[in-house]
Image (spheres, helix red, strand yellow):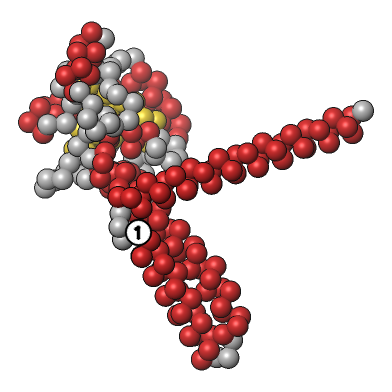
Amino acid sequence: MAEKKDKAARKQAAQAKRAESRARRRQIYEAFKMQRREDKWLLPLMIGVFLLTIAVLFGLGFVFGLQWFTLPLGIALGLLLAALLFGRRVQRNVYAKADGQPGAAAWVLDNLRGRWRVTPAVAGTTQLDAVHRVIGRPGIVLVAEGAPHRVKALLAQEKKRIARLIGDTPIYDVLVGSDEGQVPLRRLQRHIVKLPRNITVKQMDSLENKLAALGNRGAAMPKGPLPQGAKLRNIQRTVRRR
């Protein structure tokens, strides 16, 4: 009886895994179709990278009499590099569309990998300017998005507010944008993970508990960048009601 149950469980797990794999392949295919419609160079570049990789490895193998050994290696490596190129161009396209949209920085921060504690919109305005707080090994990182003439003052106020509680813990401030002294949206994650490590995970927990008592002064932000064509006036009306 137990053996039948185990067999049924294994079969069900295998079916679920196959269904997940099919769904992932469909997602990749849909992303490829969408990217190809918007990026006329995608397919030529992927084919070019694939063929060039094969040619280089086959040529090197030919010099040493190992061309039939390096050929399958070149095909595998060519497919890998073409897939990496596809991923990079899709990512660049996504960031380009999100750039400048309210909520874009919060969306990027939510996708940070590792031990980061992200609190979106700890301070904000009804124009959807916002300051987001990140706790990590560097200390406290305050990330501001919105109109610079409004958000700089907001950032300074938040920095002063939390400095009273956290003692000597370093506070970094980041303004998202494309002007001088600002960090572009596509480089935000890289900028944060490259900051020096100054505190331990235990200290991170202590900071999180201290700062939780402060609460948020920000308006509720949209989850992710606003879709293109969304009516900002309607969003702002909703924010004011909250």
Kind of element beneath mark 1 = helix
Please say whether residue 116 is visible from this viewpoint: yes
Q: Residue at x 56, y 79 (%)?
A: 70
Q: Residue at x 63, y 39 (%)?
A: 19
Q: Residue at x 59, y 43 (%)?
A: 22
Between residues 210 and 152, which one lies in front from this camera angle? 152
Q: Measuring from the top left, give residue 28's x and y in whole percent.
A: 47, 47
Amino acid type of the residue tagged 1 in the rendering: Leu
Q: Measuring from the top left, give residue 63's x and y in whole percent.
A: 51, 91
Quarter of the figure with residue 100: top left
Between residues 30 and 129, which one lies in front from this camera angle? 30
Q: Is residue 151 above or below residue 216?
A: below
Q: Is residue 203 above or below residue 165?
A: below
User: Position of 198 compared to 182: left or right?
Assistant: right
Q: Report the residue marked by disc 1.
A: 42
Q: Is residue 205 above or below residue 91?
A: above
Locate the N terminus by quadrant: top right
Locate the C terminus by quadrant: top left
User: Position of 89 compared to 142: left or right?
Assistant: right
Between residues 241 and 71, which one lies in front from this camera angle? 71
Q: Measuring from the top left, give residue 14's x and y in whole percent.
A: 72, 40
Please say whether residue 157 is visible from this viewpoint: no
User: Position of 128 compared to 187: left or right?
Assistant: left
Quarter of the figure with residue 158: top left
Q: Measuring from the top left, give residue 31's x and y in whole percent.
A: 42, 46
Q: Residue at x 50, y 64 (%)?
A: 79
